[in-house]
Image (spheres, grey):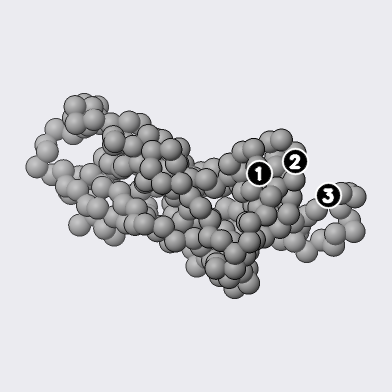
Amino acid sequence: MAESVAKTSQISLKILYDKNSKKVLFAEADKEAIDFLFYMMSLPLTTVTRLLSKSEIGMVGCLNNLRESVSNMDQIYFLEGENKDLLLNPLHSFSVQAPLLLPVPDNTNLTNYKIYKCPNHRIFSIGYMTKCTRCNINMCVNYGEQIAVPDGESSGFVKGLLKYSVMDNLVVKPISPISSICLLKDINVKDLVNVHEVVVVLGLNEGLKILKASLEGESVITSVFLDKLV
């Protein structure tokens, strides 16, 4: 069964590229897009493996074999007090405004599931009781509510009210109109006539493609959005 994913507002990237060579120069992004990318990179490796292996995109390498080995091994072979479910479904702090890749356990109704929250920190768990990884106290349960993701400047990872550049190899830096001109100069763009822009939407499918492409090489934006560069 495909994993359910929490819904969020549309997130987009503005890609600047050379029309002749179809080479991506860089992408311009706002807070929501950067939060999305940073959140994606913060996912536990076993979560990344599960998301890719269950998608049509597929998983590269053999990490999924390791995950399947844990899944298929009986609990009796694990040390007392060690739950293999914590390996397969590790905790993740998702108090960010970019939950497109947030995995929810199979056979779970988004309108009726348990959310566990640490009373001291913004640490959450879905579907099972556990202890907080920071203060080691029992998480509190909250029944039948959607994930409450704070809105505004206090949520996510980076500050809003400014733009960020995302290079083809996912190097991210704050950017301004002046620094964007300097960036074009630094990457040796001489003829602005050939510089075009296209706005692409980031969703679950695009996020999974970015995850896979980031494991395979350094031309991530190009490989994921090449068909958009017309």
Q: Secondary structure at mark 1?
A: loop
Q: Nearer the viewer, residue 85 or 228?
A: 85
State how many labels appear.
Answer: 3
**Badge 2 amino acid:** Ile
Q: Nearer the viewer, residue 117 or 69?
A: 117
When asked about the image quadrant of residue 93, the answer is: top right
Q: Nearer the viewer, mark 3 or mark 1?
A: 1
When asked about the image quadrant of residue 27, the answer is: top left
**Badge 3 amino acid:** Glu
**Badge 1 amino acid:** Cys
Label 3 vs 1, first from the N-terminus: 3
Q: Is any atom of residue 148 visible in this view?
A: yes
Name the residue rendered at 48%, 50% in the picture: 149
Q: CA distance from mark 3 to mark 1?
A: 20 Å
Q: Secondary structure at mark 3?
A: loop
Image height of 49 relative to 138, above or below: below
Image height of 104 relative to 189, above or below: below
When asked about the image quadrant of residue 28, the answer is: top left
Q: Do tag 1 and tag 2 residues touch (Cβ < 8 Å)?
A: yes
For label 2, the residue is 137
For label 1, the residue is 118
Q: Is any atom of residue 185 visible in this view?
A: no
Residue extending farthest to the left is 193
Mark 1 nearby-residue class (10 Å; few <14, some 14–19, many ≥20): many
Label 1 vs 2, first from the N-terminus: 1
Measuring from the top left, give residue 129's x and y in whole percent.
Answer: 73, 54
Q: Nearer the viewer, mark 2 or mark 3?
A: 2
Q: Secondary structure at mark 2?
A: loop
For label 3, the residue is 82
Measuring from the top left, give residue 72's x and y in whole percent.
Answer: 78, 64
Residue 128, numbered circle: none
Mark 3 nearby-residue class (10 Å; few <14, some 14–19, many ≥20): few
